[in-house]
Amino acid sequence: MRIELEKRPQASKLYGFVSPLLALVLMLIAGGIMFWMLGKDPLDSLEALLIEPLFDPWSLNELAKKAGPLILIAVGLSVCYRSNNWNIGAEGQYSVGAIFGSIIPVYFYDWHSPLLLPLIMICGAIGGALYAAIPALLKTHFNTNEILTSLMLTYVAQLFLDWLTRGPWRNPDGHGFYGTRDFVPEGVLPPIWDDTITAHWGFVFAIVAAILLWFMMRFTLKGFEVVVLGQSERAGRFAGFSPKKMVWFAFLLSGALAGLAGISEVSGTIGHLQPSISPGYGFTAIIVAYLGRLNPLGLIASGLVLALTYIGGEGAQLTIGVSDKVTSVFQGFLLFFVLSCDALIYYKIRFVRSRAHVKTGGAA
């Protein structure tokens, strides 16, 4: 007996809804097996990783802080992917956005003005957009593969950030620690409510961006253009849409949102620029985008789920004594099962009974 995938006449709406839920269940099963192989109780380990943080006020606060950049980056990536443009370099655009946004507080560190924070946010978004413009330019003018160029530029950005914060921008009064000067209070992104709730306005930016992009995709001509060109470039040309302009739009938008996420994290959470500013938000946001079905509103829920793996992974290191790599493993499980279960939307499984055919013949 063998298993075959048979293409469906049309995409299954049922599996389109069930697929993310099935992927979550399979992730839990695979995670339980992993903990069992590590010598840990599967149920207790999964509870420590995914349930306990939901009942701890401090963890919920951290959940919002980590979900903000994930949602903000994933919203931009969803537009890219729906338009058939594959931006894999959001991590680099996140870093460059943080660098650009830090220019003013680094060089004008004694400037106190209400304009400082808005300028920091704008510079961060511009920096991310400019960096995303590089793979867009290479694709539209030289027909290069944007997957490779955007991904390779990520490492350039990370090394440049490391060099800046250890060299030219290093705080002269930092007592040997790497990083820039601390941002002045006017350059720090404030908490949403008060000092007891340290989740900052980056989470609000993410929710607003998700709502605005959902409205664009649902009710505007630009959203229709994104969908048409993503499904068929030839049909888009007949409709009068420009594939090259869409490449620029998708990359600049996703880069700007990634850059805004980067400077929001630096300004709101860290307070200064340092060599390491991300636990991999730019790559994890790809999982967020697909788990949310590339729907901006769905990304809010999927962003919270992936943020929970970060918080739970940190807590699990202390409570059950596992490696910090558990978070990455769970995120890898989730991406694998999401992509696998998505196949059921377009294909159905058939079990085919094979028969052995035996040829017989006489001797010559």
Image: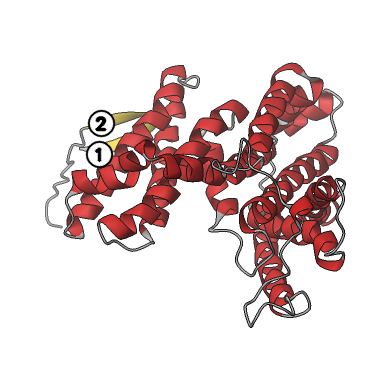
Depth check, front residue: 22 or 1: 22
**Measuring 59% from the left and 26% from the top, which residue is drawn there?**
297
Amino acid type assigned to the residue bearing label 1 in the image: Arg
Q: Secondary structure at mark 2?
A: strand
Q: Does residue 227 appear in the picture of this structure? A: no
Q: Secondary structure at mark 1?
A: strand
Depth check, front residue: 334 or 60: 60
Q: Dividing the picture into quarters, in which one does residue 208 lie?
A: top right
The spot of residue 137 in percent (x, y) is: 83, 54
Q: Is residue 2 left or right of residue 214?
A: left
Is 238 situated above or below 106?
Answer: above
The spot of residue 127 in percent (x, y) is: 80, 55
The spot of residue 62 in percent (x, y) is: 49, 46
Crowd band around label 1 with a 10 angstrom C-alpha radius: few (<14), some (14–19), many (20+): few
Q: Dividing the picture into quarters, in which one does residue 39 lie?
A: bottom left
Quarter of the rendering occupied by the N terminus: top left
Circle 1 residue: 2
- Residue most toward the bottom? 176
Q: Dividing the picture into quarters, in which one does residue 214 lie?
A: top right
Amino acid type assigned to the residue bearing label 2 in the image: Phe
Depth check, front residue: 25 or 362: 25
Depth check, front residue: 137 or 161: 161
Crowd band around label 2 with a 10 angstrom C-alpha radius: few (<14), some (14–19), many (20+): few
- N-terminal-most mark, 2 or 1: 1
Q: Does residue 51 appear in the picture of this structure? A: yes
Is 29 situated above or below 40?
Answer: above
Mark number for residue 213? none
Mark number for residue 351? 2
Asked if disc 2 and disc 1 are in contact, CB closer than 8 Å, the reply is yes
Is 345 situated above or below 1?
Answer: above
Quarter of the rendering occupied by the C terminus: bottom left
